[in-house]
Amino acid sequence: MPEATKPSQIQGLSLEAIAQEFGTPLYVYDGNKITSQIQALQTAFAGVNLKIKYATKALSNISVLKLVKSAGAGVDAVSIEEVRLGLLAGFQPNEIMYTPNCVSFEEVQEAVNLGVMINLDNLPILAQFGQEYGNQIPVCIRINPHIMAGGNAKISVGHIHSKFGISIHQLDDILKVVSDYGMLITGLHVHTGSDILDAEVFLKGGNVLFEAAMKFPDLKFLDFGGGFKVGYKPGDVTTDVFQVGSKVTEAFQEFCKSYGRNLELWLEPGKFLVSESGYLIVKTNVVKQTPQLTFVGVDSGLNHLIRPMLYDAYHEVYNLSNIEGNPKSYNVVGYICETDTLAADRMLSEVNSGDLIVFKNAGAYGFSMASNYNSRLRPAEVLVFKNQAKLIRKREDFDDLVRNQVVLDI
Ligand code: LLP
């Protein structure tokens, strides 16, 4: 359960000084938090042969990928571009799991050529894969276990109406394709959603995998996906990874006995590894009083942090420039030309224009979901690593914005 903290430093470095050096808006990541989260999972699942495949989509900066690699994790990629980022970061192809959804067969072939593990989630492409490669290329199958899980409907993906995975009810069809083409199935995968609290959900997903697995004699691993919930606000209940670890380990060991071999257990955490490491630091442009509310207008918006508007996500926020000041109620809003409330009705220490405002839990799906909406530039990113603040992505400039535009002579 997270406490209400308002960090003014990361690894002994002042956040204010970092913001001064690199400017705002700025994403700052605490590298130690990322590695300690990886270690926590490694400890929680010490009883099995665990492989962590970091869900790159959460935060895909190459330096972060290198850090993740140095801590002993691999990569979960959803696009050929994420595969390439993983390779660029130094991962071996066999450390990369490629789990696309509704991509073309050409993209799948490209991934095969790059030598990464392929995870297929529909029958037509599975059949095409079988036809093309037979038993030459090992492949994993994403099963939709039909479990309702995850924080809200937008991020729940294992239910009956979801586009993801091949329905467990179509297991016979899967087996037919596999046998028709003599395919080599070395992994089975489930991922049911994000913000999952409950060990039971992982066990339910596991049980679906365990049962299906008995029909696939060549397995090397079972992949339980990601979705561990982290705390976004004080008092939030979070996934107890040690409880999940001990329950899943017990069930997995039991399964391996009946399967007759020890398999690897794969996990694909995104949020759990990087959410809490990240801080989005923005600057107050204006404090605007209306008859109803006081708005803090900042030099950022839904273009940089879309989670509040997209999922009603709650990100803790505090005034870094006045940590202990008198609390007042504010709505923190962005500079975008539509409603972009980043934090509604929050008590912040009195805010004045120029003050630095910090959003917590900005590591996962913050920068990676940022856009150039309103022709605004995307922020810089800084990684605090070995007690030093290092720039890991330059702030965009106007040239970046117009680079790919082809201006007609009109
Ligand atoms: N594996 C697969 C196949 C996934 O689709 C995802 C997330 C993950 C792993 C990692 O899930 P995590 O551990 O980060 O919860 N943008 C949303 C979440 C959508 C995630 C999509 N897939 C958010 O900001 O909450």
Image (cartoon, rainbow, N blue to C red):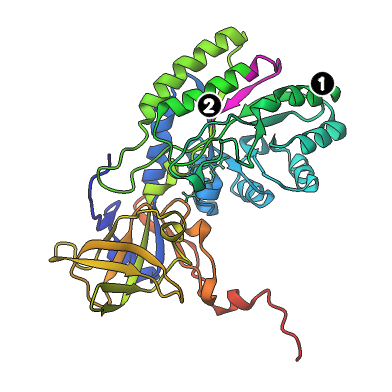
Task: Identify the mark nearer the N-term, 2 or 1.
Answer: 1
- Marks 2 & 1, CB-CB < 8 Å contact: no
Amino acid residing under circle 1 = Ser
Above/below status of 295 relative to 170: below
Q: Answer few, some or many: residues within 10 Å of disc 2's Cα (few below 14, many 20 plus, some between 14 and 19).
A: many
Residue 136 pos. (x, y %): 82, 28
Give the residue number, with chain letter if any, for mark 1: 179
User: Quarter-wise, where is residue 342 in the image?
Assistant: bottom left
Residue 88 pos. (x, y %): 63, 50
Q: Residue at x 67, y 44 (%)?
A: 101
Give the magenta part as a residue range. Answer: 212-224
- Judged from the image, the secondary structure of the residue bearing numbered disc 2 is helix
Residue 36 pos. (x, y %): 37, 38
Q: Is residue 232 left or right of residue 409?
A: left
Amino acid residing under circle 2 = Gly
Q: How far apart are the alpha carbons under marks 2 and 1? A: 25 Å
Quadrant where the N terminus is found in the figure: top left
Residue with the most extreme left position:
326
**Who is closer to the viewer here, 261 or 22?**
261
Give the residue number, with chain letter if any, for mark 2: 205
Residue 79 pos. (x, y %): 66, 49
**Who is closer to the viewer here, 26 or 406?**
406
- Judged from the image, the secondary structure of the residue bearing numbered disc 1 is helix
**The disc label shown at residue 38, or none:** none
Above/below status of 88 relative to 255: below
**376 is within the stretch colored magenta:** no
Q: Residue at x 75, y 85 (%)?
A: 408
Above/below status of 93 relative to 348: above
Q: What is the tally of numbered marks visible in this picture?
A: 2
Above/below status of 316 relative to 371: above
